[in-house]
Amino acid sequence: MPRFGLSSLFVEMLRAARLVTLALAVLGVGRYAGAQDTPLLSGGVGFFTSTNGGNTTYQPIIEPLLVAPIGQHLLIESRAALIETYAPRSNGLSGYDHTFFGALTYLQGDAILTPHVTLVGGSFLIPFGTYNERLSPIWISNFQDGPLISSLGLMSTGTGVGGMLRGSAISRRKYSIDYAAYFSARSGNEQFNSERSSGGRASLYLPEQRLEIGFSYNRLLQDTHENFYGAHVWWEPKDTAFRLRSEFARGHHAQGYWIEADYRTQAFGGLDSFIGRFEPVFRMQQTFRRDTLVSDGLPLVNTQRADFGLDYNLPHNTRIITSYARQFSSTGNRNIWETGIVYRFLFPAWKGKSK
Amino acid sequence: MSLKRFLSGFLLLSVALTPLMAAPQPGSQQQAAQQTDVKASTKQKATAKNSVHQDEGQRVFEQNCSRCHTAPDGFSSRISGTVLRHMRVRASLSRHDEEELLHFLNP
């Protein structure tokens, strides 16, 4: 990973902003369909610290998201990540090293073909489980770290280059079913790296019970072909701010699960009161090795981890995220302390008037 | 008949008839009442329809969007269509849900 200073982060940010502006200008040649369809810039800006086994790292991070509709049925969307990491020098040296990472997370075009089918093309997030597509943005996730099993089923990169069909298969008052099915080619491009794979996910949602159950299946189609299976259950009881999310994934060499619960009380003046803005979070996770032949991103020994978090939802889309985790494994137990602040922005890509 | 008498008679007749002419006919009164009722009814229906859209939109928001994230503090109405189209793809919303949410975000 190349090394840059903080100033280079801003240079990269400026470059990214220039690229985004250029992309918007190109897209702006066309006339947008309606007054509510102005392209938008969204995303999160954050600053994280993490103390893992006594070593503290600092991470300023920007995750911009661009969404631009073209006409009534087309949409271009892209997310990027710009991260500068300051970590203590190794080998007993004092001071910090810093590294910069900047990359597109995905860049895809969506064509809404029918009320039930959307065709996605380009570089897209692989639909496996729930974390990658729903919870990975920094302005959504309750913890800084993703679950230990988050790499399972994502073919190393988390993104596919190819096509995907997705949509709402059935939507009724009492239940709905959605689906996603994709094929990805192998790509060695630095920005759009992917493995040859295919798979999909189907979910059943029961609105009255606020219960979602889903299954995922992906298959790696290069080198040694491997299957990945996933299941998720989400439950948010009605009229409460309690959420329970869980996911299980099984790969060729390892498997595991995570369960996460978070709650905001409405008893002391509602969610926007001083007390109501506190959000205690708990996550339990375990991983189990089936063999140690291949590194798939999971710990090389069976691992258990409990995360206790306390988030605070400030006004103006700002969130403080703190957590303490204790990780248990045969290679040693460790404490992980994490704190961070995230601001979520969302605004039109350019000025204009409503019609 | 002198002009004076004619004009005086015309004036008196006019004064006498004015209240009768000015008073609404029973039929037109009913018509006016009906028109008022229709206007009020249309307004009520529109309000009720908006209210239904709001309730339905809120239901869709609570059942779909709130599962992953809290509502943003507020955003320009100029991007509400873009936000919803993005979420339609990302969250696999149905077209009905997208329309209800659009009404909900733009009451």
Image (cartoon, coloured by chain):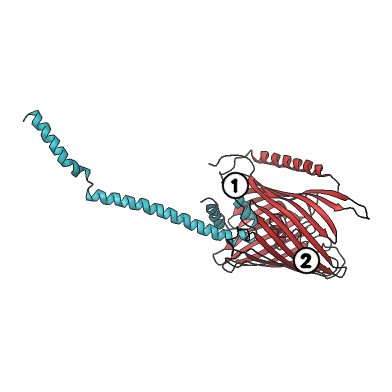
| Front one among A179 and A278 | A278
Circle 1/circle 2 CB separation < 8 Å:
no
Mark sitting on residue A263? none
Q: Three-letter amino acid code at disc 2?
A: Asn
Using the numbered discs, state the Cα–Cα distance from disc 1 to disc 2 in whole angstroms: 40 Å
Which element type, helix, strand or loop, lies under badge 1? helix
For residue A240, what is the image quadrant?
Answer: bottom right
Chain B pictured colour: cyan
| Front one among A335 and B104 | A335
For residue A218, what is the image quadrant?
Answer: bottom right
The 10 Å Cα crowd at callout 1, few under 14, some 14 to 19, many 20 or more, is many
Q: Nearer the viewer, mark 1 or mark 2?
A: 1
Q: Position of residue A57 (x, y in %)?
A: 82, 54
Residue drawn at (40%, 52%) of the image: B43
Chain A pictured colour: red
Find the residue positioned furthest to the top: B3
| Residue, disc 2 | A227
Q: Three-letter amino acid code at disc 1?
A: Ile
Q: Position of residue A141 (x, y in %)?
A: 70, 58
* Chain that bears disc 2: A
Q: Position of residue A243 (x, y in %)?
A: 65, 65
For residue A176, what is the image quadrant?
Answer: bottom right
| Residue, disc 1 | B79
Judge whether residue A305 can be spotted in this image: yes
Q: Position of residue B67 (x, y in %)?
A: 63, 61
